Amino acid sequence: MVQLVNVFNFFFLLVVNPLAAILLIIQRPTTIDATHVTFDELWNLNILEFAGLVP
């Protein structure tokens, strides 16, 4: 389990953070803003609500 957490953190640090920084530098914050995301399929919304990512 610890190795899985380490892999997730490593991926987040190497991919997500630089991508967010690049999008902020080129002034496209709506791309990474979770309040502008629309869900067309109910199962996507259910999974994200269960994970605590959307209210």
Image (tube, helix red, strand yellow):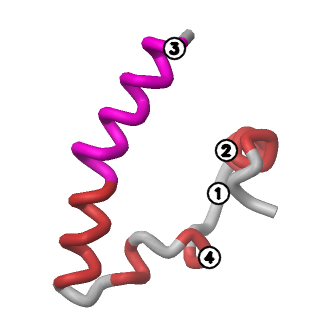
Secondary structure beneath label 4: helix
Instruction: Write the residue at 30% across / 45% down.
Output: 13
**37 or 21, nearer to the observer:** 21
Q: Are marks 4 and 3 in contact (CB under 8 Å)?
A: no
* Residue 34 x, y percent position in the rendering: 56, 69
For mark 2, what is the residue? Answer: 44
In the rendered view, tell whether residue 48 sits above or below residue 10.
below
| Percent of width and height locating residue 47 | 72, 39
The image's mark for residue 2 is 3
Q: Residue at x 30, y 84 (%)?
A: 28
Mark 4: few/some/many CA within 10 Å (<14, 14-19, 20+): few
Q: For the residue carrying disc 3, how many other residues have a C-alpha within 10 Å: few (<14), some (14-19), or many (20+)?
A: few
**Contact (CB < 8 A) between labels 1 and 2?**
yes
Determine if the magenta segment contains residue 6.
Answer: yes
| Residue position for label 1 | 40
| Alpha carbon distance from label 3 to label 2 | 27 Å
Q: Are marks 1 and 3 in contact (CB under 8 Å)?
A: no
Local secondary structure at mark 1: loop
Q: State whether residue 20 is above or below residue 17.
A: below
Nearer the viewer's eye, disc 3 or disc 2? Answer: 3
Task: For marks 4 and 2, give the CA distance.
Answer: 15 Å
| Part of the protein shown in magenta | 2-16
Q: Earlier in the sequence, mark 1 or mark 3?
A: 3
Where the N terminus falls, by quadrant? top right
Select label 4 or label 3 by which is in front: 3
Q: Nearer the viewer, residue 39 or 30?
A: 30
Q: Are marks 4 and 2 in contact (CB under 8 Å)?
A: no
Q: Earlier in the sequence, mark 1 or mark 4?
A: 4
> 9 or 28, which lies in front?
9
Dot 4 amino acid type = Thr
